[in-house]
């Protein structure tokens, strides 16, 4: 009698657990298909550099709005790209972030080019105060699917991206940050 009750209780538990697993799986699949709506990168300085900042990525329809502030830069233009790996263990020079995020094996390009690395965001411009305010709209980046930048890294370079091959000759990496999921914006 006891054994039977325990057996029934156990099978009910298994049923409930199985149902929860199925729901989690469905939620994960939906998440993978639709992608996220917001991501963030907290930029850390490499080596002896003093560059830092916070950059948000907001998905709006087919566009991703890239916005934020980066400080500690030398005045002028700095190459600005999404790189392949979200690995910033090599914080002396940022090289562990790998090359430009280029899932379709295209040449390096300008942000407005149809043929470019997905990660090619061109240049940001710092004022005399060393601060760059970023406001970019890009329709090649995504927060889900093959062009997803989640788990990759954002890199700021010492020099301007000159749009030469293979990677724009933008010099060293002065700041790097992992691109991760963000919660909804604070009002
Ligand atoms: Cu770069
Ligand atoms: Zn590139």
Image: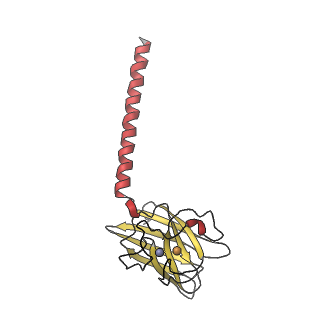
- State which quadrant residue 149 falls in: bottom left
> Considering depth in this image, is 125 or 146 the residue closer to the camera?
146
> Considering depth in this image, is 122 or 6 the residue closer to the camera?
122
Quadrant showing the N terminus: top left
Query: In this image, 128 relative to 106: left or right?
Result: right
Q: Is residue 143 visible?
A: no
**Where residue 176 appears, x then y in whole percent?**
57, 70
> Considering depth in this image, is 3 or 35 the residue closer to the camera?
35
Which residue is at a point 56% across and 83% down the rendered structure image?
159
**Where residue 172 appears, x then y in whole percent?**
60, 77
Q: Is residue 123 visible?
A: yes
**Where residue 24 appears, x then y in whole percent?**
39, 44
Residue farthest toward the left in the current orientation of the protein: 61
Count every numbered label the image shows and give the total.
Answer: 0
Indicate the colouring scheme: secondary structure
**Where residue 162 appears, x then y in whole percent?**
49, 84
Residue farthest toward the top in the current orientation of the protein: 1
- State which quadrant residue 73 falls in: bottom right
Which residue is at a point 59% across and 75% down the rendered structure image?
173
Query: In this image, 158 relative to 147: left or right?
Result: right
Which residue is at a point 38% across and 32% down the rendered structure image?
16
Q: Is residue 1 above or below residue 126?
A: above
- State which quadrant residue 110 falls in: bottom left
Which residue is at a point 53% across and 62% down the rendered structure image?
86
Q: Is residue 27 above or below residue 86?
A: above
């Amino acid at each position: 009698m006891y054994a039977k009750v325990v057996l029934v209780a156990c099978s009910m538990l298994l049923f409930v657990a199985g149902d929860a697993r199925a729901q989690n799986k469905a939620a994960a699949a939906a998440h993978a298909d639709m992608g996220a709506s917001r991501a963030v990168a907290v930029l850390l300085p490499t080596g002896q550099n003093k560059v830092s900042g916070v950059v948000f990525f907001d998905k709006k329809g087919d566009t991703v709005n890239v916005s934020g502030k980066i400080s500690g830069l030398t005045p002028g233009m700095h190459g600005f790209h999404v790189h392949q790996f979200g690995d910033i263990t090599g914080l002396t020079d940022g090289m562990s972030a790998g090359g430009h995020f280029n899932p379709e094996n295209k040449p390096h390009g300008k942000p407005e080019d149809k043929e470019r690395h997905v990660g090619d965001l061109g240049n940001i411009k710092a004022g005399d105060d060393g601060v760059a305010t970023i406001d970019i709209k890009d329709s090649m980046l995504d927060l889900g699917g093959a062009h997803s930048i989640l788990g990759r890294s954002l890199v700021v370079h010492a020099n301007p991206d000159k749009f030469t091959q293979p990677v724009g000759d933008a010099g060293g990496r002065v700041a790097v940050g992992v691109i991760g999921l963000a919660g909804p914006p604070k009002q």
